[in-house]
Image (cartoon, grey):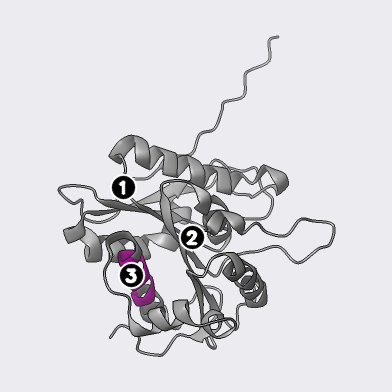
Amino acid sequence: MAQQATAVRSPRLGRIVGPEPKAVCGVVLLLPGGYPVSERRPSPLLAAASVRTLGRRLSRAGQSEGLVAHVVHYRYRGWNGSEAHLAHDASWAADEVVRRYGDVPVCLAGVDMGGRAALHAGGHTAVNSVLALSPWLPEDDVAVPPEPVKQLVGRQVMIVHGTRDQRTDPELSFRLAARAKKANRDICRFEVHSDGHGLNQYRDEVHALAENFVLGTLFGRAFSRPVEDALAAPPPLGLRMPLASGFGR
């Protein structure tokens, strides 16, 4: 009996999140979380749930400037070692944006393992900014090459991490930001004190911060004073910037 051919999986972009503008002038690609190792197919509904609320807020806030938000649906749930499936799917998504919309600036906005994917894929020529919320990063290991940062040169980068995150170590994102800052001054990192992995306690403030950063990088809107200060401050000040309660209100 002939063996049945294995279907080839392909990543895809979800439907536009929120209102669709008359003309597309910028795109934010929303990268959900994942697992270190898994070859199972992600659930589209569960994956999108972690980023859809942020996507709707960004879409509404940037509609007048022509912002479109898409959730990236991965081929696999897992990063899967050197395969780095989520990072490759993020790069594919940036290619797809160019195919659909032409030469428009792209922001990669990822949570958890999606934050790692955003950082890895940040070197894509269409990407001008990267937002990583509670990024999952591997533990330091002398046997494993450190996370790359050179691809972030020329991009504006923001990392946001809760200080009580029990799933992804905030110290690892600080170390990565410190290495990246040596080659790229346009990187900042905010700490959300007493918040956990989901950044639920200060969700409004985190989303307001994300909105300020994404619309500033894609459309040149003025950054808030805390973001300006964080980008301008030398390490470690600009990489341990506290997110104030009530930010954006």
Q: Which residue is label 1 attached to?
A: 104
* Residue 215 magenta-highlighted: yes
Q: Residues within 10 Å of mark 1 (few under 14, many from 20)?
A: some
Mark closer to the chain start, 1 or 2 = 1
Report the Cα–Cα distance between label 1 and label 2.
Answer: 19 Å
For the residue marked with disc 2, what is the amino acid? Gly
Which residue is pictured at 40% across the width and 38% down the height? 96
Mark closer to the chain start, 1 or 3 = 1
Report the Cα–Cα distance between label 2 and label 3.
Answer: 14 Å
Which residues, given as a range, are shown in magenta? 208-216
Image quarter of residue 179: bottom right
Which residue is pictured at 54% across the width and 61% down the height? 115
Question: Is residue 140 shown left or right of residue 198?
Answer: right
Mark closer to the chain start, 2 or 3 = 2
Q: Which residue is label 3 attached to?
A: 211
| Residue 110's disc number | 2
